[in-house]
């Protein structure tokens, strides 16, 4: 393989849908090009698609992986979440011995643990938002029924308590939500056998902010967040069980 060929990349971009432009294709392309330019790299071929990260059968992703392996080139994405939202799919890609991946938001020297942290974080964020939305809807539903009102999801009269803003209000509790996200990440890495010290070191290495947004990660802070996570999960389970047992429709 020539020196010029070693500097080439295969790029993959994905957005979930036409609405919401946080992960627009154009923005991802800009991030990848900026990263490539800063590291003396060029993109040989681009692949992009609009598809859910929960869908394992993505045609353009399969083509990108196949092309990268064929030419022996790294496959680059703007963020590991662009590969998907399912840990099983992410693990399949990350652990492919014939494939080298680069995540622009981590850097050229990202190790396996750092990629795991990013992928787990993305999955935990999705799971947390889903859980919080369901809890908010359940609370609003129970309140509406108790007051003798009809519960309509998606009611355009947004100021009413029985509409989706109740779920959004719950989701905006960022402090607790952030702790739960990081706690879930730490919990999964602990299950993989990593020490609190190793987890903190890698979080500092990739410059991940602490839940407060200040200071550095330490083993003690990781321990405390993990303990809070376990406590919050236990309380969530108790509230869910209590909610189910008091569901007016089941009486």
Image: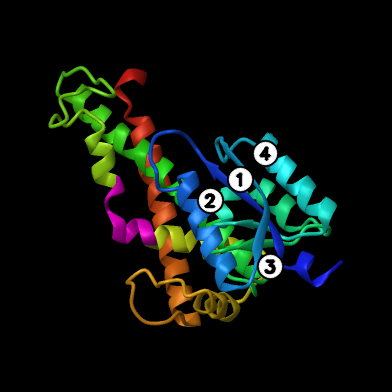
Q: Residue at x 75, y 61 (%)?
A: 100
State the predominant SS element of the stretch in magenta: helix
- The residue nearer to you, when weighing 35 against 123, is 35
Percent x, y for residue 74? 73, 60
Is there CB contact under 8 Å for labels 4 and 1? Answer: no
Q: In which quarter of the image is residue 243?
A: top left
Q: Residue at x 84, y 69 (%)?
A: 2
How crowded pointer 2 is (Cα within 10 Å; few <14, some 14-19, many 20+) is rated as: some
Residue 199, placed above or below residue 11: below
Mark 1–mark 3 distance (CA, rounded to whole Å)? 17 Å
Label 3: state its secondary structure: helix
Q: Is residue 94 left or right of residue 152?
A: right
| Residue 242 appears in view | no
Is there CB contact under 8 Å for labels 1 and 2? Answer: yes
- The residue nearer to you, when weighing 131 against 95, is 95
Q: Name the residue under label 2.
A: 123
Task: Choose the circle earlier in sequence order: 4 or 3.
Answer: 4
Percent x, y for residue 25? 50, 45
Magenta segment boundaries in residue numbering: 171-178
Q: Mark 4 points at which residue?
A: 60
Q: Name the residue under label 3.
A: 112
- The residue nearer to you, when weighing 91 against 42, is 42
Task: Choose the circle earlier in sequence order: 4 or 2.
Answer: 4
Label 1: state its secondary structure: loop
Q: Residue at x 25, y 20 (%)?
A: 152
The quarter of the image holding the N terminus is bottom right
The color scheme shown is: rainbow
Label 2: state its secondary structure: helix
Q: In which quarter of the image is residue 239?
A: top left
Task: Choose the circle earlier in sequence order: 1 or 2.
Answer: 1
The quarter of the image holding the C terminus is top left
Task: Choose the circle earlier in sequence order: 1 or 3.
Answer: 1
């Amino acid at each position: 393989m020539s020196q010029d060929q070693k500097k080439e990349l295969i790029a993959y971009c994905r957005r979930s849908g036409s609405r919401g432009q946080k992960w627009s294709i154009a923005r991802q392309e800009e991030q990848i090009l900026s990263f490539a330019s800063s590291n003396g790299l060029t993109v040989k071929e681009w692949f992009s698609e609009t598809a859910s990260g929960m869908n394992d059968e993505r045609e353009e992703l399969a083509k990108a992986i196949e092309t990268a392996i064929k030419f022996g080139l790294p496959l680059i994405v703007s963020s590991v979440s662009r590969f998907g939202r399912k840990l099983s799919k992410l693990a399949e890609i990350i652990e492919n011995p014939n494939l080298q991946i680069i995540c622009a938001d981590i850097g050229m020297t990202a190790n396996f643990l750092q990629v795991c942290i990013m992928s787990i974080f993305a999955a935990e964020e999705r799971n947390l938002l889903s859980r919080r939305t369901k809890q908010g809807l359940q609370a609003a539903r129970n309140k509406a029924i108790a007051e003798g009102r009809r519960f309509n999801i998606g009611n355009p009269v947004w100021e009413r308590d029985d509409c989706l803003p109740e779920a959004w209000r719950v989701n905006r509790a960022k402090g607790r939500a952030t702790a739960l996200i990081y706690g879930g990440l730490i919990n999964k890495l602990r299950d993989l056998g990593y020490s609190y010290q190793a987890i903190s070191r890698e979080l500092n290495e990739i410059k991940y902010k602490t839940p407060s947004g200040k200071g550095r990660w330490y083993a003690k802070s990781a321990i405390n967040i993990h303990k809070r996570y376990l406590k919050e999960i236990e309380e969530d389970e108790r509230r869910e069980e209590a909610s189910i047992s008091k569901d007016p429709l089941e009486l």
